[in-house]
Image (cartoon, rainbow, N blue to C red):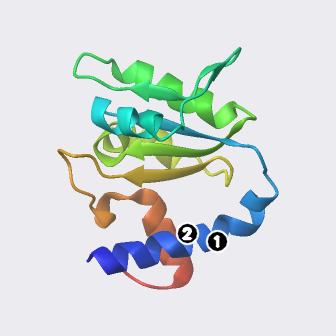
Amino acid sequence: FFLFACFLGSSLLLIIKQKFTMEVGKLVAVIGDEDTVTGFLLAGVGHRNAQGSNFLVVKQDTKLQQVEEAFMNFTTREDIGIILINQHIANDIRHVLKDYHATIPTVLEIPSKEHPYDAEQDYIMQRVNMFLGGTI
């Protein structure tokens, strides 16, 4: 399963490679639980400017509207190239994700420590798979 997920992930990256290479200097945004966001911040992904930060820590008391607003904000910012979102959080705003069709910023669903990745729930991977003519 892991190799299959890696293959699909690499296929998605190949599809967006040409478009994304033209988008030099873009940031990675992260919407996730505390462990996920902290890990990416420690890796140097965090950024804060006049437009705000490029991350949102989602806790149990975080309102769904806040997550939706952060996602919509990240998708409209010119300085964001990729949005990473924990899959269990993506499931909560699936209705918003299904309405998002732009290539850049690219949305990638990732697992969290508490919630493993499930390719069948990943709408983006389903679209890529349909594009490639396969099944999950």
Q: Is residue 40 above or below residue 4?
A: above
Where disc 1 sits, the SS reads helix
Mark 1: few, some, or many residues within 10 Å (few <14, many ≥20)? few
Disc 1 residue type?
Answer: Ile
* Residue pictured at 31% horizontal, 18% vertical: 62
Where disc 2 sits, the SS reads helix
Distance, label 1 to label 2, CA atoms, is 5 Å
Residue 45 in picture, x, y percent from top left: 54, 38
* Residue pictured at 50% horizontal, 67% vertical: 127
Residue 107 visible: yes
Q: Is residue 120 above or below residue 32?
A: below
- Number of numbered markers: 2
Q: Which residue is mark 2?
A: 12
Asked if marks 1 and 2 touch (Cβ < 8 Å), the reply is yes
Numbered label attached to residue 79: none
Give the residue at the far right of this rendering: 22
When asked about the image quadrant of residue 88, the answer is top left
Residue 9 in picture, x, y percent from top left: 47, 69
Q: Is residue 102 above or below residue 53?
A: below
* Residue pictured at 33% horizontal, 26% vertical: 58
Q: Quadrant of the N terminus?
A: bottom left
Q: Which residue is mark 1?
A: 15
Mark 2: few, some, or many residues within 10 Å (few <14, many ≥20)? some
Give the residue at the far bottom of this rendering: 133
131 displayed left or right of 64: right
Residue 39 in picture, x, y percent from top left: 37, 39
Disc 2 residue type?
Answer: Leu
Q: Is residue 115 above or below residue 128?
A: above
Of residues 65 and 43, the one nearer the viewer is 43
88 displayed left or right of 22: left
When asked about the image quadrant of residue 121, the answer is bottom left
